[in-house]
Amino acid sequence: MIPPIYRIWREPRRLAGHWLLGLALVLGIDAFGAAAEPAAQWTLASSNLTVTLRGADGAIDVRDHRDGHTWSQKPAAANTRVARARANGQTLEFDLVQAGVEFSAILRIEPGCPEFTIEIRPPATMARPLAWPHPFTSSPGAWLVVPLNEGIGYPVDDPAVNPMRLIAYGGHGICMAFWGVADGSRGMLAILESPDDAAIRIARLDGRLVIAPEWDSVHGKAGYSRRLRYVLFDRGGHVAFAKRYRQYARQIGLLKTLDEKRRQNPNVDRLVGAVNVWCWDRDAVGIAREMQDAGIDRILWSNRQTPENLAALNRLSVLTSRYDIYQDVMDPAQFPRLRSVHPDWTTPAWPDDLMRGAGSDWIRGWQVRARDGAMIPCGVLCDRQALEYAARRIPLELETHPYLARFIDTTTASPWRECYDPDHSQTRSESRHWKMELLRYVSQDMRLVTGSETGHDAAVPFVHFFEGMLSLGPYRVPDAGRNMQQIVDEVPERVARFQVGHAYRLPLWELVYHDCVVAHWYWGDYNNKLPALWDRRDLFNALYGTPPMFMFTRPAWEQQRERFARSYRASAPIARAAGYAEMTDHQFLTADRRVQRTAFANGITVTVNFGPDPFLMDNGASLAPLSRHAAGIP
């Protein structure tokens, strides 16, 4: 039997004071039930929180003493129960049974702050992801805060939002290991402290959106204990979430600023405030000169060039870069079927260095269209093997080609992958390690300003820019990665609503890492991709303190030279002035979110009006529709 002090607390608020239970726990009074009673529950308390575990369904209730609000979980399916529980001090250890599978967990309440952690010890073998803890329910009018690429807020009542599963171990998921629920001025943040084999699932419960974690196996086994931290806020919303996560990122060594990186490589300064240009015209030097004559003075030229062109561009203070990749490997037996052979495929890796699945078959990657129209898949190079191929290619090229930067495609976009090849087996954690070693080699050993695709904060210590962080992956135009140069005149509804939707977008990435990594749009989703949305993209660049991206041919440049120059002027000077500064705040100045303001640590503020009507600012000035106002720029 459970001693009375731990037995069924149906109404914790009836206690004379939460300190009474807290005192009992601190004294180490032990409670253990061989089998939990259906209505049993166990409670831990601190000066900030009361946390209750319900035995019947394994759900958790959390009462915030500061405002009296209670956050409650609800199982998505009634298949979990607490089998045994034991409390000791500020810790509750317990066993759960879910769909007939038993696992254990430890809940710890943090003294002196409104936080608690859960450590999960999964079952020895895992046939499917472990889905626990349950989601906390959301109230009408609340928002989910999700670091999907740059960041997005989903109204929990919005029927336009589709349920989805987002991995935490790759750029096409959540790029930072947290999520939150903002309910008016209060909120709850969850930090995945074990993200390498974790995901979040956005689902509907009682008609409203909720989020819960899922834990994947490690080669089919538990692998290690998983850890999750919940943080409660009585005010602050998404900005408070981002700043708490920034504190955590600093604690675990992810926060490395561009100023620190500039001290190691002065060429980083050429990146800050530079427009990212993708152009395949042979006269790169001539176009760069024309751009600078038009006032576009800071340029990241991303396409490969001859040694002579590179030297000339470097003299113009252009940051010279080129595309590279250490993932896709095409079977050389397929080369006769192809229109062309990509020069950056690591063909010698076929087949011994390919990543293999549990059934020993090679993992399929990017598909290439053959002459007959068929799609032929590449194999995926094992991350453990990739560094060797980079070490063969890059130093040899730099002997003749004076590049100052390099873009490594897919490394942070594609997931950390398990490999089952016995000669180079790897877990997802080892995959992450080797991906980061590749980026570290390029940026530190090769001393190149380094970028990668989409973006993930595991790479923040090693890279300087991400192509794709500003673009929300699920809401790009269809086939943006294949039809990169295609200009799209008709705007898809999902792109208008979410990709450039001022009511949804949140600068979560900038609030955490603006002073650490330069964020760009995706190369198939650049500023001039959809002319009808060009102005709005410029405004988001200005608001976030990020530079634009252009993709064009020489005829397009000659026809729209002034429009490109205007786009550059709208945001690049702000990106330059705020480039080394932390974003300290983001506000919605109107209830419909049409007017927003950001603030940076060096005193710069940017106000943007996405709406159709003028906005009267605090200083009495009128901010015109689809315009911005920047203050504090020297």
Image (spheres, rainbow, N blue to C red):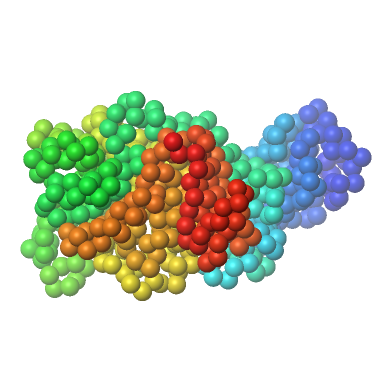
- Residue occupying image coordinates x 37% and y 62%: 534
Identity of the residue furthest to the front in this view: 620
Dividing the picture into quarters, in which one does residue 394 lie?
top left
Residue toward you, 532 or 243: 532
Name above or below for residue 302 compared with residue 210: above
Residue toward you, 274 or 447: 274
Image coords of residue 106 (percent x, y):
65, 39
Whether residue 427 is visible, yes or no, is: no
Image coords of residue 511 (percent x, y):
51, 43
Residue toward you, 10 or 512: 512
Dividing the picture into quarters, in which one does residue 491 lie?
bottom left
435 displayed left or right of 48: left
Whether residue 141 is visible, yes or no, is: yes
Image coords of residue 253 (percent x, y):
46, 30
- Which quadrant: the C terminus? top left
Image coords of residue 403 (percent x, y):
18, 38
